[in-house]
Amino acid sequence: MESRFNQERRGLLKSGCKFVVAAALAALLTVGGSTSAFAEEPAKSPHKKKVVLHTYVIERTIPGAGNFSKEKLREISQKSNGVLKDMGPDIQWVDSYVTDDKIYCVYRAENEDLIREHAKRGGFPADRISEVKTMISPATGK
């Protein structure tokens, strides 16, 4: 047989659980304003979602590029840098390689559309844009 003390204790625990559940529901309703608050869009996090940048090689046909003066190349670079600054951190210029009639640029960007937008704003051709899938080097063969 169960003692009177244990019976009273079990009764208090049962009523205590009901009280805790009721208090938790009341707290949720108070914080949320109403149950409909839970159906609304969650609050914006102050932390920005990390953007994944892909690497692209851009082929630009620019006749005579290999003969451009240092000043002309500086002007082109300054124009590109200005456009990049306006576009924000989701697109970055890594390097460019100048040949006789083409410039091959390596960029990191969230997507190909940003590469095209940069070319449009800067007045640069973007004849071919290829996403880099992987890189190899002499060390790859060791």
Image (cartoon, grey):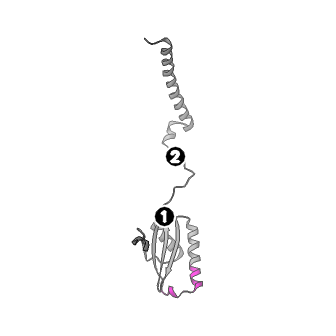
Q: Quadrant where the N terminus lies?
A: top left
Residue at 52 percent of width and 25 percent of height: 19
Q: Which residue is mark 2?
A: 42
Q: Who comes first in sequence, dot 1 or dot 2?
A: 2
Residue at 55 percent of width and 74 percent of height: 80
> Dominant secondary structure of the magenta stretch?
helix
Callout 1 secondary element: loop
| Depth check, front residue: 130 or 133 | 133
Callout 2 secondary element: loop
Residue at 53 percent of width and 36 percent of height: 34
Q: What type is the residue that disc 1 sits on?
A: Leu
Q: Is residue 24 above or below residue 136?
A: above
Give the extent of the magenta segment: 63-76
| Depth check, front residue: 98 or 1 | 1
| Depth check, front residue: 96 or 62 | 96
- 74 on left or right of 40: right
Residue 83 image offset from top left, x and y in percent: 56, 71
- 8 on left or right of 71: left
Q: Residues within 10 Å of mark 2 (few under 14, many from 20)?
A: few
Residue at 50 percent of width and 86 percent of height: 66
Residue 61 image offset from top left, x and y in percent: 46, 82
| Depth check, front residue: 97 or 119 | 97
Q: Which residue is mark 1?
A: 53
Q: Is residue 137 visible?
A: no
Q: Is residue 68 magenta?
A: yes
Q: Is residue 17 magenta?
A: no
